[in-house]
Image (cartoon, rainbow, N blue to C red):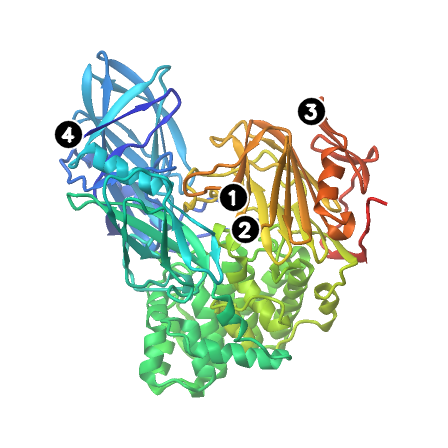
């Protein structure tokens, strides 16, 4: 039986069939030094060269890398990926390196054309001879180079050595592209029969989960109609460790739990597999399931599927109080019982005065390690630790006091203090927490010497206080640069609540309270269906797909009993141990009648992100108006639809091929190329110009398990959730993939130049879903001279060509940083 797996790559295509070595990791230590850089007042990617990278680039030498006969222990199985990608997260600086081997076949000797892309560096050997080095080290955004490789007639061995410096998140990958005008053939040699490998690859390609969020049901896997010659043993690892370095540290993120491997037998004829109930796998948020099948030689073929598990019946019984004080107590009681090695559990139990020295150590040891090592996100846990300790010192065991002092006095609080770490200081949320930590630590140890800064405590406090005042001054001027972010509001909350709890100056505590009031107002403005449905300056896939498990939903439930309580406790725990209450006048935004509609417009951040929101109890439509169109995006979420009780849909242009990869933008979150977007009440228009992106399609996330009807009518797509409706018109044909990991989960539309229109509505406005379909599908909509023309049965004539006209007049977006909104009556019975 053949053991040579053959493949071909078309002109412009990418080589993805390789054998890989083990990834080597080496910690990078450099001399301590200070640095200078401004805090980013905008969201998105920006490059900062840390001293560790400067030193690394000065000393690293790829010329020394010689060809090695490595043990290629992994068959890289790309599935949907279009590159060799080992992206990871390491909180302290490490050098990563790996070897990849493939075979190329050509008919005659010659020099052949390729292109190489990487964020780090590559060195390519052909038939054991070094041929080229490309070392941009362009920190998580790729650089590209046209290259040539000499190939001889017949078979050629091509080995790619690739490396990078991991500073927190690291996009560790390379892409090798065929730049010839003809197809290139290749092969990899396996240690098992090709038929055995291909059958397992096909099985893992077709497998998908029946839903992306499981609330009550069993967790089911669809195995597809794959013809199998035998039964297989399937191993499922829950939340396999993403970091390539085992550091034993954690930053208070409780979603990274792990449980014992699950093992199943997959019969030959089995089409669906039950992998457990919502009770058997903990509720923690976005859960990664690594599915693995072992080859006969012991190698594993694995792929990752993602889902969220929310035991709704369990959590509905936890927060039941009719007052906010009672709900806070209920939350604290629940958090105190969680069996987690988590600093927040320790802080809750310290507040409740329920900790022995042994118990406290078990809950804070990994957090202490992250702070001691100055790992990234150490500020997320140091700020609340200092706050709660400041106010409730008497509740901490005696041994803890010396440890706490040592921790605080030896920390690096800003980049003007010498260090060699890669903690991220430069986004608004991190800057806030570093300043909070410096201020509180200086106050707590005012007469002590801080070793890293060589300052006294009083000086640290004064510097921290001044930095906080500057941070808040800017914040109250332009709001959040990471606008409306359900990802980073909880982190900002950590800072605000830490100051509210422990700020020694009334001036600072007042600023923290004003910031809390402002943030809760934003949450209330954008509230829909138990969560916060809006556009977001920064977002991740797990936020979008699991809003019910996000921290903001839990905060909403504690504050107003209108959300989804869950295990996320970084901000929820701090909120619950304070006497803070959101402003009373926000209730009108949360308790709207069915005949009311809210319309809000406001700007945020230095980039003037203009957010437009139109919502009622049936639906919410939110957009960021013409936000940097045609530019490459990062994590900006620009078009959001919410139907009924928090069924979220959105549209984006993917930033990578892997369905749940680690890049920013990713497949589901952010846009590789940002669109022109305009909105008028419950109608939105968008124009995507996808010339300079590898991914020339847009897609709509379609959670089919949570929808009641999906109707296709030529270029129209109509969706119903209970009495909530949405219609989408695409100028290009759309399709819904029905197989593989994302089966039935997206509506995909190809084309470099495409427009779309979105209309949200409800039974209140059209009396029936059928009326809604007929009113729109038979209405006038056309695409003429690069202009989308539409006549709406509710609001009249529109024209869109990157600028929106309504009844021949430009729709103006003129609101500033003040949050402006109005609540009016919904327009009912459009048919009359």
In the image, taking residue 287 as reference, residue 69 lies left or right, namely: left
Residue 492, visible in the rendered structure: no
Mark 3 in CB contact with mark 2 (< 8 angstroms): no
Of mark 2 and mark 4, the one earlier in the sequence is 4
Quick one: which residue is furthest to the right in this view? 832
Residue 182, given in percent of the width and then of the height, sits at 35, 15
Q: CA distance from mark 4 to mark 1?
A: 47 Å
Label disc, if present, on residue 689 of the rendered structure? none
Q: Is residue 450 left or right of residue 42?
A: left
Mark 3: secondary structure: loop
Q: Which residue is mark 1?
A: 634
Q: Kindly report the distance in space between the C-alpha atoms of the residues bearing marks 3 and 4.
A: 57 Å
Residue 813 appears in view: yes
Say which of marks 3 and 2 sits in front. 3
Sequence-wise first label, 3 or 2: 2
When asked about the image quadrant of residue 468, the answer is: bottom right
Q: Are marks 2 and 1 in contact (CB under 8 Å)?
A: yes
Mark 2, residue position: 538
Q: Position of residue 808 (x, y in %)?
A: 83, 32
Q: Residues within 10 Å of mark 3 (few under 14, many from 20)?
A: few
The answer for how far apart the CA atoms under marks 3 and 1 are is 27 Å
Read off the residue under disc 3: 786
Task: Identify which residue, 31 or 615, lies in the foreground.
Answer: 615
The mark nearer the N terminus, 2 or 1, is 2
Q: Secondary structure at mark 4?
A: loop
At 46% from the left and 78% from the top, the residue drawn is 348
Q: Earlier in the sequence, mark 3 or mark 4?
A: 4
> Which circle, 2 or 4, is nearer the viewer?
4
């Amino acid at each position: 039986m053949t053991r040579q797996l053959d493949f071909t790559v078309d002109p412009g295509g990418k080589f993805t069939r390789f054998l890989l070595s083990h990834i080597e990791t080496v910690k990078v230590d450099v001399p301590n030094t200070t640095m200078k850089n401004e805090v980013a007042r905008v969201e998105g990617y920006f490059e900062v060269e840390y001293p560790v990278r400067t030193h690394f680039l000065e000393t690293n030498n790829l010329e020394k890398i010689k060809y090695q006969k490595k043990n290629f222990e992994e068959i890289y199985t790309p599935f949907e990926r279009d590159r060799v990608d080992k992206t990871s997260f390491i909180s302290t600086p490490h050098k990563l390196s790996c070897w990849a081997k493939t075979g190329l076949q050509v008919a005659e000797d010659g020099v052949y054309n390729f292109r190489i892309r990487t964020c780090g560096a590559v060195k390519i050997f052909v038939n054991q001879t070094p041929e080229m080095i490309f070392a941009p080290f362009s920190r998580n955004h790729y650089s590209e180079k046209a290259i040539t490789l000499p190939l001889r007639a017949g078979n050629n061995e091509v080995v790619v050595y690739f490396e990078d410096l991991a500073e927190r998140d690291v996009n560790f990958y390379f892409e090798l592209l065929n730049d010839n005008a003809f197809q290139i053939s290749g092969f990899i040699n396996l240690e098992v029969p090709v038929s055995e490998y291909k059958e397992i690859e096909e099985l893992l390609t077709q497998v998908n989960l029946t839903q992306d969020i499981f609330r009550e049901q069993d967790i089911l896997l669809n195995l597809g109609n794959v013809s199998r010659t035998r039964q297989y043993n399937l191993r499922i690892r829950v939340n396999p460790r993403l970091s390539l370095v085992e550091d034993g540290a954690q930053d208070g993120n409780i979603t990274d739990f792990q449980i014992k491997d699950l093992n199943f037998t997959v019969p030959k004829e089995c089409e669906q597999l039950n992998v457990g109930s919502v009770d058997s796998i903990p509720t923690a948020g976005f859960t990664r399931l690594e599915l693995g099948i072992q080859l006969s030689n012991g190698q594993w073929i694995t792929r990752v599927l993602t889902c969220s598990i929310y035991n709704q019946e369990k959590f509905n019984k936890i927060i039941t109080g009719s007052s906010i004080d009672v709900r806070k107590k209920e939350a604290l009681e629940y958090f105190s019982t969680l069996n987690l090695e988590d600093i927040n559990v320790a802080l809750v139990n310290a507040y409740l005065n329920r900790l022995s020295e042994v118990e406290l150590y078990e809950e804070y040891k990994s957090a202490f390690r992250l702070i001691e090592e100055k790992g990234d996100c150490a500020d997320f846990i140091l700020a609340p630790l200092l706050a709660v300790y400041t106010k409730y010192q008497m509740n901490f065991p005696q041994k803890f006091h010396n440890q706490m002092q040592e921790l605080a006095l030896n920390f690096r609080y800003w980049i003007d203090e010498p260090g060699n770490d890669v903690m991220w200081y430069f986004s608004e949320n991190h800057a806030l927490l570093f300043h909070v930590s410096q201020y509180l630590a200086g106050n707590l140890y005012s007469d002590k010497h801080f070793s890293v800064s060589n300052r006294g405590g009083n000086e640290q406090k004064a510097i921290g206080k001044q930095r906080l005042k500057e941070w808040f001054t800017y914040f109250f001027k332009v709001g959040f640069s990471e606008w409306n972010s359900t990802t980073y509001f909880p982190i900002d909350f950590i800072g605000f609540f830490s100051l509210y709890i422990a700020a020694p100056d009334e001036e600072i505590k007042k600023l923290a309270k004003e910031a809390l009031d402002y943030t809760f107002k934003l949450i209330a403005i954008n509230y829909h269906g138990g969560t916060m449905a809006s556009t977001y300056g920064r977002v991740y896939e797990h936020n979008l797909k699991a809003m019910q498990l996000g921290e903001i939903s839990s905060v909403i439930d504690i504050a107003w009993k209108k959300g989804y309580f869950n295990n996320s406790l970084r901000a929820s725990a701090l909120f619950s141990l304070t006497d803070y209450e959101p402003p009373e006048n926000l209730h009108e935004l949360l308790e709207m009648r069915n005949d009311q509609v809210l319309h809000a417009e406001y700007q945020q951040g230095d980039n003037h992100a203009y957010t437009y929101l139109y919502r009622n109890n049936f639906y919410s439509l939110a957009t960021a108006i013409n936000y940097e169109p045609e530019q490459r995006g990062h994590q900006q979420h620009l078009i959001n639809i919410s139907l009924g009780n928090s069924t979220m849909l959105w549209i984006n242009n993917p930033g990578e091929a892997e369905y749940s990869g680690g890049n920013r933008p990713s497949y589901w979150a952010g846009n590789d190329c940002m669109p022109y977007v305009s909105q008028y009440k419950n109608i939105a228009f968008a124009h995507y110009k996808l010339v300079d992106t590898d991914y020339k399609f847009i897609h709509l996330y379609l959670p089919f398990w949570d929808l009641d009807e999906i109707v296709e009518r030529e270029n129209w797509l109509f969706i119903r959730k209970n009495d909530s409706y949405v219609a989408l018109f695409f100028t290009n044909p759309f399709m819904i993939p029905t197989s593989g990991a994302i089966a039935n989960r997206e509506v995909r539309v190809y084309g470099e130049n495409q427009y779309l229109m979105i209309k949200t509505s409800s039974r209140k406005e059209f009396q029936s879903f059928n009326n809604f379909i007929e009113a729109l599908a038979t209405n006038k909509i056309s695409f003429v001279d690069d202009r989308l023309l539409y006549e709406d049965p509710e609001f009249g004539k529109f024209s869109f060509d990157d600028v929106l006209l309504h009844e021949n007049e430009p729709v103006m977006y003129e609101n500033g940083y003040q949050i402006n909104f109005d609540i009016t009556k919904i327009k009912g019975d459009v048919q009359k």
